[in-house]
Amino acid sequence: MGKFDGDALACEAASLAYTDGERTNYALRDVTTTLAPGRFYGIMGPSGSGKSSLLYVLSGLKKPTQGSARFGAFVYDRHADADVTRLRREKFGFVFQQPFLLPYLSALENIILAAPRQDKPAREKARALLADLGLNGLENKLPSQLSGGEKQRVSVIRAMMNDPQVIFADEPTAALDHTNGHRVVDTLASYRARGTVVVVTHDPEMVGDADEVLLLRDGLLADVQQPAELRTNTVSARLVGASPAR
């Protein structure tokens, strides 16, 4: 399959600040980066480093208090909230730490909620994705009848239903064991031939197949590395709060 050719994500001198009385706290500080399309990016750093904040800014879920963020030529803070919401709905897919499946709907029904039209082609597409990801036969199961890993993979399929140009995943494996975590990340990584994938995680193993890993600390973009460097670089290990390989 050919390389995906879509729009880049970028932020320029982006800061995200919160005021607490007379004190200003920065979730992000002066971050500039560009994520080329059709690649798998990890975002890592210690707790409170700004990982999720960077994902929210890149996806337009939060507007930076200084600087700017954009998708292609679409600069979020130059458009009305309704236009940004429409862009996210049409171009982006999201996966969060919790799957947020509706408990009274089956796996199949939860997935097709994200389709532009909930018709027969949408059902066929959802069934094909379930089969591709090893969930064949679970179409009619309620969320309460699925394991944690199965529910999270259902949420990944839901994020793929609209064929988004970008999938954003915020700590999608935090509540899973390593086996199920790898299944979820492998599913996400496979999407890079069709779009861009951005995964926030605290676990270096979950971004072992990434094209690049952005390392944050104290709201600053400290470095951008290849996954192999994370396993051998002592400085990088300190940045992500892990232990270097020995």
Image: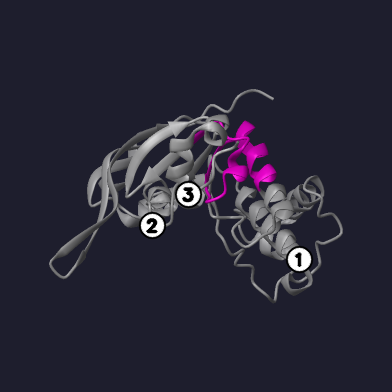
Nearer the observer: mark 3 or 2; the answer is 3
Q: Residue at x 68, y 75 (%)?
A: 103
Q: Can residue 72 be seen?
A: no
**Span of residues in magenta:** 185-213
Q: Can residue 74 be seen?
A: yes
Residue 222 circle label? none
| Mark 2 burial class by Cα count in 10 Å: few <14, some 14-19, many 20+ | some
Q: Is residue 192 magenta?
A: yes
Q: Which residue in the protein does label 1 denote?
A: 147
Q: Is residue 240 left or right of residue 184?
A: left
Secondary structure type for disc 3: loop
Q: As rendered, which of 202 and 63 lies closer to the eye?
A: 202
Q: Please tell me in which quadrant of the rendered image residue 244 appears.
A: top right
Secondary structure type for disc 1: loop
Q: Residue furthest bottom?
A: 104
Q: Residue furthest top?
A: 2
Secondary structure type for disc 2: loop
Q: Position of residue 177 (x, y in %)?
A: 69, 58
Q: Residue at x 80, y 68 (%)?
A: 141
Q: Please tell me in which quadrant of the rendered image residue 81 appears.
A: bottom left
Q: Amino acid at mark 3?
A: Gly
Nearer the observer: mark 1 or 2; the answer is 2
Q: Is residue 204 left or right of residue 137?
A: left
Q: Label 3 to label 2, Cα distance in Å? A: 11 Å
| Mark 3 burial class by Cα count in 10 Å: few <14, some 14-19, many 20+ | some
Q: Which residue in the protein does label 2 denote?
A: 48
Residue 241 circle label? 3
In the image, residue 174 sits, relative to residue 229, either above or below, namely: below
Q: Residue furthest left?
A: 22
